[in-house]
Amino acid sequence: MTAVDHQVQVPSREELVARAGELRPLLTESAAAADRDRHLDPAVVDAVAAAGLFKLTVPRRLGGFQADMRTLLEVVAELGRGCMSTAWVTSVLNFSAWQAAIFGEPAQDDIWGNNPDARVCSVFGPARSAEEAGGGWTISGAWPAASGCAFSDFCALSVPVAIGPDGPVFKAFLVPLADMTIEDTWYSTGVRGSESNTVVAEDVRVPMHRVLELREALAGVRPQVRREDKLYLSSWSGVGATATLVPQLGLANAVLDLVMERSRDRRIPPAGIADQSEDAGFQMRVADAGAKIELAWHMARRVCDEVDAASATGELPDDMSRGRARMYSALASQYVYESVETMMSEAGSSALAQGQPLERMWRDMSTAHRHQAYRLDPARKVFGRILLGKGPGVNVRF
């Protein structure tokens, strides 16, 4: 396929954040229905698409904005203040578009050549099957938790193709959703509107230009990417570390704001409190929660800025930067999770009544924080080894 030049004028970061902010009332109004119905309102999906927020990381030559990670951070966090599921899907689809771009121009043209608004989801799960033959691969299997698959045109997924000295050797594949089926399996406690269902492939043929050796890609090997497209030469893990963190940042800010707003009219007679906002204990816990959120933002910005700085040079970030990205992202998620737990305790049991916004937001944070990307112990191990000069360790993806 020969790509059509879809280049458009790229909005500034400030303009894109403003667009996200303009969507917040719609997202806030629709969040309860998304949670109840387990899918986003099509009007919300259309509004995010119309604002261009699904194509932040799509190559510029194909109609995308090819924006940096700091822009992704600020935009998605703004959406997270309104609806975690919308922010989650927007962030995952942008991370997936970034992944798809590193497959090279022929694969990019398959996705966006005739449709600059095409979307990509991704899921990298356990063992499936693949067989090489005739200049391509045939894959089969089922991949659960493919966030945003209902709104996507392609899916990036992984399959073990051999056993090497360090364990399974994985390849990544780009597959049209039209060649797959979707099973309704996403019955989750939180982030319910993301429709993170199971995608299923049965003997799907994938041409060689839509296949990557995953370990090499994680290590920064990008022979298919033009040197001038520096965004796609950076760290896979550094980009991925922020993808599902940033919705949590926006949600934590929204919870803090809502609990503080409620406190001004909240009386707690058993404790002799006529105005919760005047209570010294409440003020101290607000300070704790607010400081943790600010620290989380600081760490997220540091990660994004280091990824962007490396992208500007076209070089893979060094081990220290990549290890820090993993550590800071996990720690930032822990901080915002703790801040929400603190604020929910201050909001009291009434905030946990079914149908209350805070109850939904609490479930969303509890679910998002437990994503395997934010497990602290693996992040500590990798970063600790790097600080000690021992390297990240064998068979570590970071």
Image (spheres, rainbow, N blue to C red):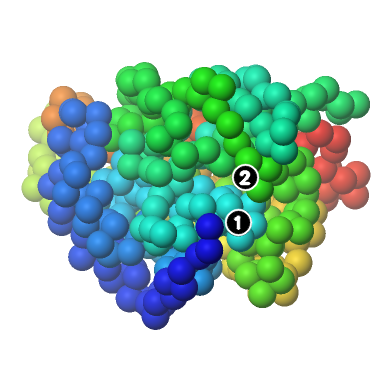
**Position of residue 372 measured from the top left corner of the image (x, y, whole percent):** 56, 31
The one nearer the camera, 58 or 321, is 58
**Position of residue 8 measured from the top left corner of the image (x, y, whole percent):** 40, 77
Quadrant showing the C terminus? top right
Q: Residue 125 carries which label?
A: none
The one nearer the camera, 206 or 78, is 206
- Dot 2 falls on a residue whose secondary structure is helix
Taking the spot 47% from the left edge, 39% from the top edge, the residue there is: 176
Q: In which quarter of the image is residue 49?
A: bottom left
Do callouts 1 and 2 mark residues in contact (Cβ within 8 Å)?
yes
Q: Residue 106 carries which label?
A: 1
Badge 1: few (under 14), some or many (20 or more) residues near its Cα, within 10 Å?
Answer: some
- Measure how far apart labels 1 and 2 are at the Cα level: 8 Å
Q: Disc 2 marks which residue?
A: 210
The one nearer the camera, 301 or 193, is 193
Q: Is residue 365 visible?
A: no
**Position of residue 224 measured from the top left corner of the image (x, y, whole percent):** 71, 58
**Position of residue 58 measured from the top left corner of the image (x, y, whole percent):** 48, 61
